[in-house]
Image (cartoon, rainbow, N blue to C red):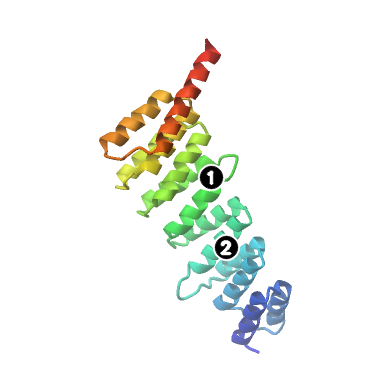
Amino acid sequence: ADAVTYTSLIDACGKAQQLERAFQLLGQMFIAGVRPDAFTYWALIAACAEGCDADRAFAMLRQMEAEGVKLSLQPETPYLVVITAFIDNKQLDGALKVLQMMRDSRLQPPSLIYMELIDACLQTPSGGLERAFRLLQQMREEGLEVDLETYHLLILACGEARETGKAFEVLRMMKDASVVANSDTYDALINACAEGSEADRAFDVLRQMEAEGVKPSTTTYALLISARGRAQQLERAFS
């Protein structure tokens, strides 16, 4: 049997979620003196991802790199699949490591994978916000587009972390990128002010909304009331 035959069998095993059998076939290839090619490793990576085994998918990706083989078309695909597998397994460190491998290999990660990583960072209890900001900065440096939902997630995360200043920094980044803020953007910012007990800044946001022609909603006013209430509670606590 040649590499094409073994690869087809490995691919079939992956689709049938018979991961151990796929690796047995890889072992048989080596015993038979048949060298795996890029498509073989890709089939194994896909099989590992299908079987939720991100660590073995990563090992196959490293083996691909060590042997200097890559897919002739869309060489970034194995990297993206391994990143997604790590994200699905909540293994953020692994996902970020593969992202760096891509960049080291001069492969451009797409906006979507960056945004998935940012979302994953924001779900990490320790150090996630700082990592998310670093990824956002990388996107900006690489000229990649960030969608409005990602900016909103960052502002909300800043609020939860009581990092009101960073929430306003996200708004500034949006404006620098010519992304138009809407009522959801400003509601998220007002919520960040409320979380930080900064009622005056929350009302500044309201005035900014009105100046830009963005109509406040009932949610906006509810958040402003919450911001004022939290600020008053804080004042009473220190009086």
Residue 131, horizontal then vertical, whole percent: 51, 44
- For badge 1, the amino acid type reads Leu
Q: How crowded is mark 2: few (under 14 residues within 10 Å), some or many (20 or more)?
A: many
Instruction: Residue 16 in the image: state x and y as whole percent.
Output: 67, 77
Q: In this view, does 36 lie above or below 175?
A: below
Residue 92 in the image: state x and y as whole percent. 59, 51
Q: Name the residue under label 1.
A: 122
Residue 165 appears in view: no
Compared to 176, does 19 lie above or below? below
Q: How far apart are marks 2 and 1 (CA)?
A: 20 Å
The residue positioned 44% from the left and 63% from the top of the image is 107
**Residue 218 in the figure: left or right of residue 127:** left
Residue at the extreme top: 239
Q: Which of 170 and 22 is in front in this view?
A: 170
User: SS class of the residue under badge 2?
Assistant: helix
Which part of the image, by quadrant, shows the N terminus? bottom right
Looking at the rendered structure, the kind of residue marked 2 is: Val
Task: Please tell me the numbered disc located at residue 2.
Answer: none
Query: In what element is the residue under mark 1?
Result: helix
Q: Which residue is pictured at 35% across the width and 37% down the height? A: 216
Residue at image mark 2: 82
Q: Is residue 10 left or right of residue 78?
A: right
